[in-house]
Amino acid sequence: MRLSKLIKNLDFETLNFKDVEISYLSEDSRDVKEGTLFFCISGFQFDGHDFAEEALKKGAVALFVSDKRRAREFKKHNVPIVISKNIR
């Protein structure tokens, strides 16, 4: 499914937007494979933003983040970044 279709009804901003094909969704970098939209979710013990680089190395084609400041760190990877306060 195209990224634009997945996010069309959400309140969001984007960086590096490209309408890439998304084959998988994951919030766990260990499960990422080529074509994944990786969700950087901040939890009680871990912050998914800390695992975004690993997810990109494993084949994530886009990131969904909640921290706008951190999103700018990932801009250098030239992948689409969706920013939304309500990531869940």
Image (spheres, rainbow, N blue to C red):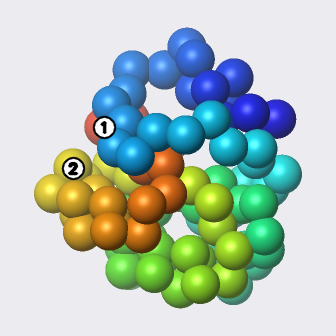
Tell which tag, 1 or 2, sits nearer the viewer. 2
Q: Camera-side residue: 44 or 24? A: 24
Q: Quadrant of the image for the N terminus?
A: top right
The answer to whether marks 1 and 2 mark residues whose Cβ atoms lie closer than 8 Å is no
Q: Quadrant of residue 14?
A: top left
Q: Report how far apart the C-alphas of labels 1 and 2 lie in the structure.
A: 9 Å
Give the x, y percent position of residue 82.
43, 42
Residue 41, visible in the rendered structure: no
- In the picture provided, is 61 more to the left or to the right than 43? right
The kind of residue tagged 2 is Lys
- Seen at 68% across and 83% down, the residue is 58
> Which residue is label 2 attached to?
68
Number of disc labels: 2
Q: What element carries label 1?
A: loop
Instruction: Tell me: residue 69, above or below residue 48.
Output: above
Give the x, y percent position of residue 16.
40, 46
- In the picture provided, is 13 more to the left or to the right than 6? left
The kind of residue tagged 1 is Lys
Q: Camera-side residue: 19 or 63? A: 19
- Seen at 78% across and 70% down, the residue is 34
> Which residue is label 1 attached to?
85
- In the picture provided, is 25 more to the left or to the right than 72? right
- In the picture provided, is 17 more to the left or to the right than 31? left
Dot 2 surroundings within 10 Å: few (below 14), some, or many (20 or more)? Answer: some
- Seen at 32% across and 68% down, the residue is 76
Give the x, y percent position of residue 36.
72, 60
Q: Quadrant of residue 41?
A: bottom left
Q: Quadrant of residue 9?
A: top right
- Seen at 46% across and 74% down, the residue is 52
The circle drawn on residue 36 is none
Dot 1 surroundings within 10 Å: few (below 14), some, or many (20 or more)? Answer: few
